Image (tube, rainbow, N blue to C red):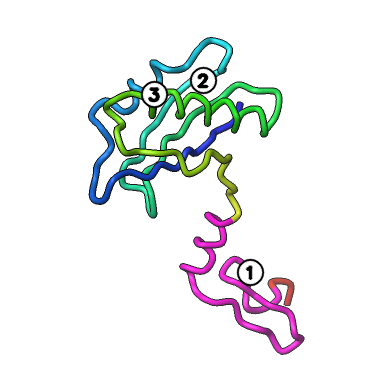
Amino acid sequence: MYLVHASLRGPLDARLPEGTRSLVRAQARDEDGIEHVAVHPDAQPHPVIGLYVRADGLAAAEARAAEVCRRALRRPEFGGWWLLGARVPMVAPFYESLLSASGPATAAADGTVHGPLGPPESPST
């Protein structure tokens, strides 16, 4: 199963329509493999719809999620909205942001770098 984030763009200052989750879910067919839909209307820089997709591979999951979103965006409630992309999010940026939020890494006298998760001194001394 894959979590696919579909980024949407709408008219200036527009909010996603009421019932977005149900509107998207209603467009899923059995063969799409959609297990769950989550809506993140305040995600930056654009609203995101998260689709949990059963698929044999990453590309298939992204394609299925994109197609379900395209079907939903044809509904009149989504007038002026379009799909920017449907991608499985990478987790590395999340962890990098956690590390950078806890302070910069510093170089030790031996040239190694000790970040916020490493000790400033060797624990075996």
Residue 15: x and y in percent read: 25, 41
Q: Dot 3 corresponds to which residue?
A: 24
Farthest-out residue, bottom: 109
Residue on which disc 1 sits: 118
Q: Position of residue 98 (x, y in %)?
A: 50, 61
- Residue 119 % position (x, y): 63, 72
Q: What residue type is labelled 3?
A: Val
Q: Is residue 25 magenta-colored? A: no
In the picture, measured across the screen, residue 21 lies left or right of residue 15, that is right
The residue beneath circle 2 is 34
Q: Which residue is drawn at 56% across and 44% down?
A: 89
Marks 3 and 1 in Cβ contact (< 8 Å):
no
The amino acid at mark 2 is: Ile
Residue at 66% across, 28% down? 60
Q: In which quarter of the image is the N terminus?
A: top right
Looking at the image, is mark 3 or mark 1 nearer the viewer?
3
Q: In this view, does 98 lie to the left or right of 123?
A: left
Label 3: state its secondary structure.
helix
Asked if residue 112 lies left or right of residue 15, the reply is right
Q: Give the range drawn in magenta.
A: 93-122
Task: Say which amino acid is labelled 1.
Answer: Gly
| Inter-mark Cα distance, 2 to 3 | 10 Å
| Image point (52%, 26%), residue name | 67
Left or right: residue 107 compared with residue 51: right
Q: Residue 28 carries which label?
A: none
Q: Mark 2 touching mark 3, by CB under 8 A? A: no
Front position in the image: 18 or 90: 18
Indicate which disc, 3 or 1, sits on the residue closer to the N terminus. Answer: 3
Q: Does the magenta stretch include residue 102?
A: yes
